[in-house]
Image (cartoon, grey):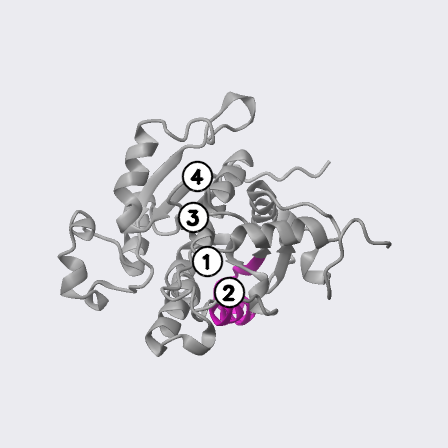
């Protein structure tokens, strides 16, 4: 028996704002394996998420084995567009959704973790953040501003997290990020530079695995997940069609579940994966392996 045991480990899952996305599923799996979990939430979503959390709106979806429930040690505000306070415009600082947070940049998150838990508070960091303001536009119609915004929020934010949190990791630390098949295949409708951002994220995973591995002794991996109807993915307008395509044409002809991604995250963060770094691991029912569509009604 090879149990995944994360007892005594502390994880930070960045990108939890509801119970529908991969961030929540990852947090549940890490907690199921014994880790204590902190969450980081986008400031505009922070109030609604924490209010619903305190009122028990997620009690059913938070259930773990043995009658336990997912519990967050801390829920931090984080806008990963900003590395440090001086990067934030006056307009954002004066926004009522940001004014209530004394800290919300990546550097400030790092400081809050140290203030709360000491100099080396972390064992696991999971990046579940992506945003492309022009995601519904074809790449040919995407503006420079929209393209760079997609890369900043969806890929450079991971680089910045590794820069600032790797020095705070304990021995054997693990970083994970979330990608999508559009990083290497054409997915019509997934626009606004998001395909480029996911390709950059996978490339950065390899480079960071080398650089952060040599400098800090941490591992860096990426999960390329199949389509899932999270709130963010639903903004593309065609997520249901993507899920249906995977269900019909994958080697395992069924859609993925968020828990599948959570289980892979727990494995990659565990000592069982201590020799795995710089990898993009597919959790997509094998759809990445297919060259053309193939339905169950067709002969094998």
Crowd rating for badge 2 (residues with CA inside 10 Å; few <14, some 14–19, many 20+)? some
Please tell me in which quadrant of the rendered image residue 163 appears. bottom left
Question: In front of the other: label 1 or label 4?
Answer: 1
Q: CA distance from mark 1 to mark 2?
A: 7 Å
Quarter of the figure that contains the C terminus: bottom right
The residue that label 3 is drawn on is 231
The residue that label 1 is drawn on is 236
In the rendering, at what x and y percent does residue 129 appear?
Answer: 42, 56
Residue plotted at (55% across, 43% down): 258
Q: Does the image show residue 14?
A: yes
Residue plotted at (50% across, 47% down): 229
Crowd rating for badge 3 (residues with CA inside 10 Å; few <14, some 14–19, many 20+)? few
Q: Does 99 lie within the magenta span? A: no
Q: Residue furthest top?
A: 67
Q: Is residue 30 left or right of residue 245?
A: left
Q: CA distance from mark 2 to mark 3?
A: 16 Å
Label for residue 189? 2
């Amino acid at each position: 028996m090879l149990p995944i045991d994360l007892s005594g480990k502390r994880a930070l899952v960045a990108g939890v704002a509801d119970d529908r996305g991969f961030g929540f599923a990852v947090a549940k799996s890490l907690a199921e394996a014994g880790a204590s979990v902190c969450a980081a939430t986008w400031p505009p979503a922070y109030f609604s998420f924490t209010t619903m959390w305190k009122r028990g709106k997620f009690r059913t979806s938070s259930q773990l084995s043995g009658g336990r429930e997912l519990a967050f040690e801390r829920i931090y505000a984080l806008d990963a567009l900003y590395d440090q306070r001086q990067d934030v415009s006056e307009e954002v600082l004066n926004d009522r959704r940001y004014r209530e947070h004394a800290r919300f940049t990546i550097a400030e998150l790092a400081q809050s973790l140290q203030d709360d838990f000491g100099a080396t508070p972390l064992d696991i960091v999971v990046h579940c953040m992506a945003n492309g303001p022009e995601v519904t536009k074809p790449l040919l119609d995407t503006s420079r501003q929209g393209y760079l915004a997609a890369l900043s929020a969806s890929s450079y934010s991971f680089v910045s997290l590794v820069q600032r949190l790797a020095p705070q990791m304990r021995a054997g630390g693990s970083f994970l990020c979330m990608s999508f098949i559009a990083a290497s295949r054409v997915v019509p409708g997934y626009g606004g530079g998001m395909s480029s951002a996911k390709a950059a994220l996978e490339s950065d995973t390899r480079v960071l695995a080398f650089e952060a591995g040599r400098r800090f002794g941490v591992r860096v991996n990426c999960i390329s997940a199949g389509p899932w109807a999270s709130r963010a993915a639903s903004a593309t307008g065609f997520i249901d069609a993507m899920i249906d395509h995977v269900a019909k044409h994958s080697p395992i002809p069924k859609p993925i579940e968020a828990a599948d991604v959570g289980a892979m995250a727990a494995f990659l963060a565990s000592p069982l994966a201590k020799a795995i770094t710089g990898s993009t691991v597919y959790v997509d029912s094998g759809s990445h392996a297919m060259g053309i569509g193939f339905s169950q009604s067709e002969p094998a």
